Image (spheres, rainbow, N blue to C red):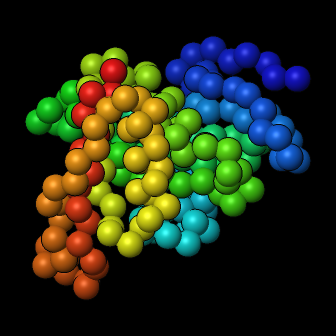
Amino acid sequence: MTIPETGPNAPTTADSVSGAPDATLTIRRPDVSDGAAMWRVARDSGSLDLNSSYAYLLLADHFADTCRIALMGGDVVGFVTGYRLPADPTRYFLWQVAVDERARGHRLAGRLIDAVIDDQPEVSSLVTTVTEDNTSSRRVFQRWAEQRGATLDEVTGFEAHHFPDGHEAEPLLVIDGIR
């Protein structure tokens, strides 16, 4: 049984995931107590640049309005982090989206993005950076843009020479017309 929550951490989406040990999936705003689990999901993803655990605590606490987590039972199995650009609050910058392998194959990344964007009515476009070889993330964003009837364009983002550590370039994906 799912008990409805109220307040700023109230779930924004709840449904079931077939084949999962606990079929109830809840998407809600994170709080500081979720930061460690977000860090673990990022670490275990195998594809994300892992930020410090402190960064995930800050995101879960200071940026809770523009981040979401997915819970299966009591476990965090996915998250999306991002923020509205200070110079253009109609644009949402998606920093990271990650889904634990236990919850993959259920369009959870897209549902997390839906949850955070649907709670930001002033946002009309989404931007993110994705390396050229990250085909799974690129598919997620392409599918999400198509389902929204939006356009997806790629422009120069962070070039390899911007990074001090040999990181490959991160082109900027711009998704316009999301509403």
Q: Residue 99: x and y, percent? A: 60, 54
Q: Residue 136: x and y, percent? A: 49, 61
Q: Residue lying furthest bottom in this view?
A: 166
The residue drawn where x is 61% and y is 68% is: 44
Kindly indicate the quadrant of the structure image that contains residue 67.
top left
Q: How many marks?
A: 0
Viewer-nearest residue: 77 or 140? 140
In the picture shown, does residue 62 fall above or below 157? above
Using residue 19 as the reference point, say whether residue 62 is left or right of it.
Answer: left
Kindly indicate the quadrant of the structure image that contains residue 13.
top right
Residue 52 appears anywhere in the view: no
In the picture shown, does residue 103 fall above or below 112? below
In the picture shown, does residue 61 fall above or below 134? above
Viewer-nearest residue: 152 or 82? 152
The residue drawn where x is 58% and y is 31% is: 28
Residue 98 appears anywhere in the view: yes
Viewer-nearest residue: 66 or 111? 111
The residue drawn where x is 33% and y is 21% is: 179
Using residue 57 as the reference point, say whether residue 45 is left or right of it.
Answer: right
The residue drawn where x is 73% and y is 47% is: 75
Kindly indicate the quadrant of the structure image that contains residue 88.
top left
Q: Residue 158: x and y, percent? A: 18, 65
Please state, as top left, top right, bottom left or bottom right, where the N terminus lies in the image.
top right
Q: Residue 87: x and y, percent? A: 11, 36
